[in-house]
Image (cartoon, rainbow, N blue to C red):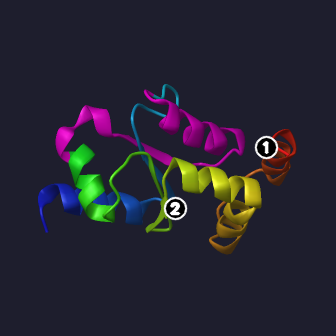
Amino acid sequence: MSDVKTQIDETVKANDVVLYMKGTKEMPQCGFSSRVAGVLNYMGVNYADVNVLADEEVRQGIKDYSDWPTVPQLYVKGEFVGGCDIITEMTLSGELDTLFDENGVEYSKEAADKIREANA
C-alpha cells in the first residue's frame, strides 16, 4: 500500500467520523464541503476534517481509496458513506441519524429534526 493510501486508511480507521473536504470544518473552501461540514457542525458531531487542498497526494489519494471521483467524502467507523448529495439526502430522510445511532456516534437529534423541518 502506498504511503498516502496507508495514511488515509489509518485516518479513517482511527476516527469514528472523518470528512475529507476542501478546506477545514471552520473554513470550508467549496460549497459542497461547506454543506456537509455545516450539517455535521450543526448536529454537533465530533469529526476529524482533512483538507485535501493542503496535499495534492491526499486529494488524489482519497479518490483512489474510495473509488469515488469527488470531494467531500464522509467516512463513519472506517466505512465510506458518500459525498455531498448522498449526505444531504441521508440527512433529510433520517438515514444519517440511523447510521450514527447504529455506530454509536453522538449527535443532536433535535438539530437533525430542525434541519428536516427547515427543508420540509
Disc 1, SS: helix
Residue type beneath disc 2: Asp
Mark 1 crowdedness (10 Å alpha carbons): few <14, some 14-19, many ≥20: some
Q: Residues within 10 Å of mark 2 (few under 14, many from 20)?
A: many
Residue beneath label 1, please? 115
Front residue of this view, candidates 22 and 4: 22
Q: How many marks?
A: 2
Task: Find out whether residue 62 is within the magenta segment.
Answer: no
Looking at the image, residue 34 sits to the left or right of residue 61; the answer is right
Q: Residue at x 81, y 48 (%)?
A: 116
Vertical arrangement, residue 63 with respect to residue 59, above or below:
below
The residue that label 2 is drawn on is 16
Q: Residue at x 53, y 47 (%)?
A: 84
Q: What's under tag 1, amino acid-wise?
A: Ile
Which x, y percent locates residue 100? 66, 64
Look at 29% across and 33% down and name the residue there. Answer: 53
Measuring from the top left, give residue 42's x and y in whole percent. 70, 39
Relative vertical location of residue 91 with respect to residue 30 in this rendering, above or below: below
* Residue drawn at x 44%, y 46% as measured from the top left: 72
For this orientation, the residue located farthest to the left is 2
Magenta range is 29-57
Cβ atoms under marks 2 and 1 closer than 8 Å: no
Q: Is residue 40 above or below residue 95?
A: above
